Image: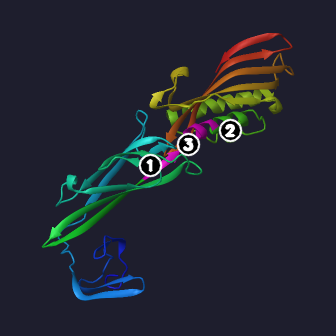
Amino acid sequence: MVGGRAATNVSVQGTTTITATMPPIPTPGLAEVAVTSGGARAVLSGRLNLVAPSGANQPPVVTTMRSIGSRINQPTGFADIDETVTLTATVADNETPVSGLTFEWSGPGTFTGSGTSVTWRVPSSVGTTPAPVTVTLTVTELYTEGTVTHRNVGTGQFVMQVHDSQKEIMDMGVDFLTLFSRSEVPTDVVLHNFSQTCDDGQGRVNEASDVDNSRAMVVEDFSKFTVARRPPVTFNFGGRCPFRLRTADACSSYTVHWEATIKQGPNEGKREITDGIDYVTAVLEQNRWRLCHSDFDGTVRVPALGTVEHVSR
């Protein structure tokens, strides 16, 4: 005990030596040191002089922190579960060069390296995604005033939005196609995961027109609808997706099967069967995935007429 408070990191080095980390003492001056062992207690009174730092030496300051992801143009502050990213900090200290400071990175996951830049393997599970995950950088400066070595500590925190992008995007794609296949569902509900701003909102406008046209022309037989994911989702932040070169951050696709009854025109009342691939793009907006475009490529059959037509819309 020092000054009536418990020391930490106590280590017995031998029969006459103990090392320990001083507890925080609110008031400088002479302090009592007490050692207890095996029921016996020894006290050193008035011999340990606690000296407070003058305050002239200020703690290090973490001015900025950012992440560099594993994908080209991946935005800072974004990561996927189990991804390895680079974390970089800028640190300022008026009295000690950065090379003279010590750094400790902490948080969930695994950190590799030291200093102002380390690699971080994001945890493989963070619960429901996206989820904020906080990384803390502790910077320590040791300096001497007179004959006493003091410690200054500065900290910085960086909040990463951690995603399971494969699941998030695929789930939204299946949700959209499933709602599209229920003729009673209103268009705005079908498109509830679509961005209002991606491609100046044109993707959502186009898809709303497709949903409205489908509602006007056919009645879907939802019991016959099937959808299968075609992983993986591919990522190209700020780039384009292969099918129709849509601008997007992520590209996904699904195998779909629809059966419907035609509502109007010369084939009214006949069965229409559609099979093909639906290509769905996604964008990252304010750290959340949103759908942007949907493009279908496949065939439409009318069995009663024996016709097969290739469609791309």
- Give yes or no for residue 163 being in the magenta stretch: yes
Q: Quadrant of residue 276?
A: top right
Q: Position of residue 307 (x, y in %)?
A: 79, 10
The amino acid on which the numbered mark 3 sits, given as a three-letter code, is Asp
User: Mark 2 — residue?
Assistant: 175
Name of the residue lying farthest toward the left: 146
- Give how far apart the Cα atoms at labels 3 and 2 are: 16 Å
The amino acid on which the numbered mark 1 sits, given as a three-letter code, is Thr
Q: Secondary structure at mark 2?
A: helix
- Give yes or no for residue 14 being in the magenta stretch: no
Q: Position of residue 279 (x, y in %)?
A: 61, 26
Query: Residue at 77% across / 34% down in the picture?
Result: 183
Circle 2 crowding by C-alpha within 10 Å: few under 14, some 14–19, many from 20? some
Circle 3 crowding by C-alpha within 10 Å: few under 14, some 14–19, many from 20? many
Query: Residue at 30% across / 81% down in the picture?
Result: 26
Query: Which of label 3 and label 2 is nearer to you?
Result: 3
- Give how far apart the Cα atoms at labels 3 and 1 are: 18 Å
Name of the residue lying farthest toward the top: 306
* Residue 91: mark: none
Q: Is residue 244 visible?
A: yes
Which region shows up in magenta? Answer: 159-170
Q: Position of residue 86 (x, y in %)?
A: 38, 43
Q: Quadrant of residue 17?
A: bottom left
User: Mark 3 — residue?
Assistant: 164
| Colouring method of the image | rainbow
Q: Secondary structure at mark 1?
A: strand
Along the viewing direction, whichever of 192 and 236 lies nearer the viewer: 236
Q: Is residue 195 visible?
A: no
| Position of 221 relative to 306 (above/below) | below
* Residue 110: mark: 1
